[in-house]
Amino acid sequence: MAQGLRSLRRRNESWRALAELGLASAAVMHEVKNSLQGVASALFVLEHEPELSPRARQFVSIAQHELSRVFDVSAQTLSLVRQEKPVKVRPTDVIEEVLNVYSAKIEHKQIKVERRYDFAGELESNPGALRQVFANLVLNALESAPRETGRLTIHSYACFHPEDEKKSGVQIEFADNGPGIPEEYRKRVFEPLFSTKGKGSGLGLWITHRLVAKQKGRLRLLSRSEGESTCFSVFLPFTSA
């Protein structure tokens, strides 16, 4: 019986190792996805070019279809495993870079972006990781916000850590006026492979949560109730040391 238990324990450990490997592999693909957002934005603009010939439009459609397949299996993990020395970075500058990448989508859906940068200073962090965090949260908001009447509000302000008043930093909130997240899903939004959209890999928020934690920060969901909008709050310390 003891031998059987040891065998079962080894088997469970092997399954856990395979699960971790699978998640890590999927997260690497997510990095590819975010790197291709610029390509997707360019194709989106090209698709709506009125002078585009039917043949060229057909090739654009093919490229978008193939790109969507890459997005479906993509995830980001390199920032989770590599160790990089923190540098001085201005989070609001990174946010503006992300908004510029998604400018075509914002314009097409006629979404109003409201900025409230009460804190626009610097902190020590990883610019690449911050870009992935902000890109995931902005994209989620843009997909949730309704067309024409959609709104994305970004608010940054200095504060103390929600659970440690000895640690100060900046809080950045990304709020949209979409349908919100059902109550039964809110505790699971940061789980790997879980998605409320019925599409995608279900790794975006899990990776975002891990990236924020690696910066010694905290990511929270502040969605009040279904039908009332969604807000994700990111706390980043002034120094991640």
Image (cartoon, rainbow, N blue to C red):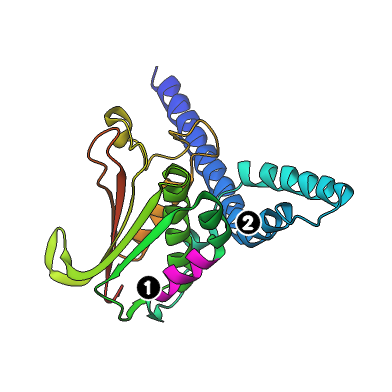
Residue ID at (42%, 45%): 145
Instruction: Classify the position of the C terminus by image quarter.
Output: bottom left
Across and down, in percent, residue 12 comes to 46, 30
Residue 17 higher or lower than 173, as above or below: above
Question: Is 116 or 95 nearer to us in this picture?
Answer: 116
Q: Which of 16 and 131 is in front in this view?
A: 131
Tell me what residue is drawn at x 33 percent, y 38 percent: 180
Q: Which amino acid does label 2 sit on?
A: Val
Q: Position of residue 24 (x, y in %)?
A: 54, 49
Asked if residue 73 shows in the view, the reply is: no
Residue at image point 31% right, 72% down: 240
What residue is rendered at 44% in x and 40% in y?
Answer: 192
- Label 2, label 1: how many angstroms apart (C-alpha)? 22 Å
Of residues 42 and 137, the one drawn nearer to the viewer in this rendering: 42
Give the mark, 2 or 1, whose residue is nearer the N terminus.
2
Query: Could you tell me the amino acid type at mark 1?
Result: Pro
Give the residue number, with chain letter if any, for mark 2: 32
Seen in the image, is 24 located left or right of residue 89?
right
Residue 91 has which mark? 1
